[in-house]
Image (spheres, coloured by chain):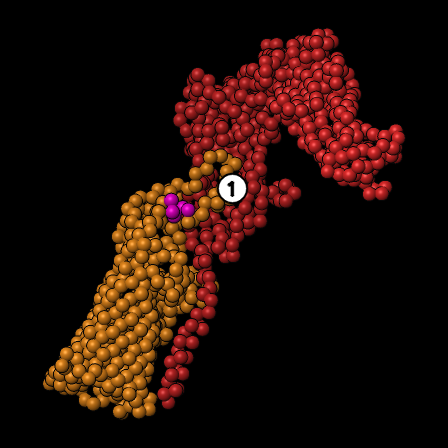
Amino acid sequence: MTKTAVLLFLLFFVLFFSCRKEIGKPFWDTQLLAPLVNSSLDINNLLPDSILQANADSSLKIVFQNDIYNLSMDTLFKIPDTTVRQIYTIPFPVTFIPGQQVISNSQSETTYNLQGVQLRTTTIKSGFVHYQIKSLIKERTNYIYSIPCAKLNGVPFTVNVSVPRAVGNLAGVYDQTYDLSGYIFDLTGIYHNKVNTLYTSSSAMVDSLGQPVLINNTDSLIINNTFHDIIPSYAKGYFGQKTFDIGPSETKFALFNRIVDGTLQLEDINFNLKIENPIGLDVRVYFNNLSSINSRTGNSINLSNSIIGSATNIDRASENGWNVFPVVANFPLTVSNSNIKQMIENLPDKFGYSMQLIANPLGNISGSNDFIYSDKLMKAQMDMEIPLSLVATNLTLVDTMTLNISNSGNQDVKSGTITLFADNGFPFDAALQIYLLNDANSIVDSIFANTNTIDEAPINSNLRVIHKKLTKIAIPINENKMNLLYNTKKLMLKIKFNTSAQPAYIKIYSEYTIDVKLVADFNYTVQLK
Amino acid sequence: MKRLFILFFILSFTTITKAQIATIFADDFIDSAKTHIGICGNYDLNSNAFTTSFLAKFYTSGYIGTDLKNSVLSRVKNINRVGANFNYGIYAAFKLDSFNHKKNVSAFFSIRDRFHFDAQFSKDLYKVGFYGNSQYAGKNANFNDFSLNMIRYQQFQIGLFSAKLDSAARWGIGLSFLKGGQYLSLLAKKAELFTSEDGQYIDFNTDLYVAKSDPAHKGFGAFNGYGASVDIYFEAPFQTRLGDSKLRVSVADIGFIGFNKQTLTLKQDSLFHYTGFKINSFYDLQDSTIGNTSKDSIINSIAPLKKQSFSTTLPAIFDLTFETHFNKHFYLIEGIRNIFNGNYKLMAYVKGNFYFNSGFMLSTTFGYGGYGNYIYGIGIAAKLGKDAVVYAGSNNLEGYIMPKKTCGQGAYITLVKQF
């Protein structure tokens, strides 16, 4: 009976714990009302990638810069990979004693063909020399290999190497690659009267700890120097008189990337076409064409200005030590001297260009003192200032956003209403729509049943905003749409702007903001974790 | 353990099981003056708000539907209680030859694992937790006087008591060393949640105190602190015109546990004004931006927890009974019971012990108070052979009988062998 009682007691505990098993995850529905996000957005938040600056009256302007073309060192010249092969033989059999020289300071020049470019000196940014010796001498030989014209901190490139003895007809081989980064090469040759020419020097002797060795006329020494992947950081000489036809080509223009529809009229625009020459090289430039291209509409507008088709000489840069003083040529394009306003109002996504550059149009007038730094490139760029005084008519911006709403088991938002509170301080209204995209970026559904418009702020007679205006937009999301959102990875935001008081130009001031708040009232399933 | 804690928060527990020390004085069918050993265990749970059906669904997982939530809502009052206890252990008692030149003194020791949970919460807290805050648009949800305590510790107790003499009073005292395991305490004297009419902001005004033992050490083996407690028992027989009577009074668990410096504490008296996640651009309006803010970092930013040592007093149990022996077959016991520092409501109860023969007793209990409302219990004491007795039963049957309307449930069992 006592045993039975003990068993009963134990059973009590066993049952208690076994019934617990793994505690599950109960879940239940709740109706939650809570703000999700809030923000106070100024124009900077609406126009990403742009640089906004405020004028004295706090009105804003867009300052934007776009490169058109960069002239690199490669365009002027490129140092090719080169192999120099030297073969040494003894005309008749001689016995060499240990320490006796076999080759004495044998120098060899290599001249590059750089197609009109005559370099006198260059600094190596990166590059290598591959040094290989094949010896048929039956004793170890020691070599001094140097490039006297290549110096690093004033010390010529020199290496001492030892080549093993040949065994039968099997040559002793030495094979090594050396880094030449940072070396300054004098390319005027042994006697400093050439261009594009470097030279090397080799000496060889029988190992002083070896044995006397008989060297026959068949016991050759073959030395291969291969200079490869040489990229200069600096070069000096005469770069030749060359003509470069650039384009027709296109360069991307990102400022209006998100605009997909509508028109934009600008009150003013300041545009400057700039060429900066940091190369010690005279240049003559011909602009053949500059065009504003809107790929979406297919509309293209060519620049109308006196620089098109005219020759412009740009003087060479100067250097003082390592300091370079570039020469800048500016070509201002204004509303009065060009059709630049129409070109920008075309809302281009790229600019087309075609031009011709003539290097050293007057020949070698620098006494072979042209210079170039690899990190200082001649570039043509557009600088523009666009005062935000505008008329926007159905100006439609589109952008995509990634979405990753986690759907963890039963813990989900089932359905509900999201309310957008927009307190708009801008003098334009904004019609808003958000689309759900599939993996192929095709629209599968929209958040709003109809397009909803955020009202414009009221303005006074000076066309300035008096106060903000609140718009409340309810976005019902049923269970089907919510499920669709869970499976959506991308959203497309589409906003259509119309400025107030059209056709008057409306200025955008730095203090203008829109306060946005999203409030959710949704059925949420709580699940304990 | 976290889920267990949440479970116990939702569950409700109560008991009128004897205070720990009183178990040792049990003398039905045994002579407590003799050497005896016992093993015992009990659990109890009760609430004046939750129902057994609700808790069963919560415990076994699954969807808690509106009907089930509504069944609890109909019971929920402005102030609601939940409570739980789970204890098990062993003890031994033996008579000393003499103690301070006195005969009839026995010594005892016991080792127990103790768990206690209790909480007090408002109706609004239940409604917000299980229905959401949408119904409170433009209104305050009142969570004031929210209180929650959970403690687990191990107890090593030694003590003395006077051996049984029919005509004399008995006494007992036990001193305990306590090993602190887990502890959690939340106290919000003030806690109000205001949801604006249009949901544009939520204000949470709270005066909150939190203490939580080292979360890196949990379970039976956790040693996060130590403390001491004392139990006292007194029994006085006397005669009434109805028959032999006894007055019993016991207090148990008068003590404290000091938790170590790894205890996380928070004292916060603040108004939190929430207007949503702040974003800086339309293009931040995506889950990757919003969702990356972890709950822990939010909690830590608005309510930074501080590590420091912390001491807490134990929930102390007071029990007072008056026992009348009407005849050798029927004893009637009236009693009151309270747990101090445990969100407990004073309980009054009556208990009838029916002695069918020299080896079997049936008891029934009826009471009101504690963590629930009305309680009903039944138990037995039975001799197992010559020198062993089993005490078993439940002081809370109502949750088993009416699971959709009540909550209380519990069970106890003690097996004693005397030598």
Residues drawn in magenta: B297-301
Name the quadrant of the N terminus of chain A.
Answer: bottom left
Which residue sits at x=43%, y=17%? A57
Would you place residue B404 above or below residue A335 in this image?
A: below
Q: Secondary structure at mark 1?
A: loop
User: In this rendering, would A191 be left or right of B342?
Assistant: right
Who's orange, chain-wise? B
Which residue sits at x=46%, y=20%? A54
Residue B250 visible in the current orientation: no
Would you place residue B226 above or below residue A510 in this image?
A: below
Main SS of the magenta part reads: helix
Picture colour for chain A: red
The x and y percentages for residue A339 are 63, 14
Residue matched to label 1:
B286
User: In this rendering, would B17 be left or right of A344?
Assistant: left
Q: Is residue B300 magenta?
A: yes
Which quadrant of the view contains residue A14?
bottom left
User: In this rendering, would A275 be left or right of A479?
Assistant: right
Which quadrant of the view contains residue A157?
top right
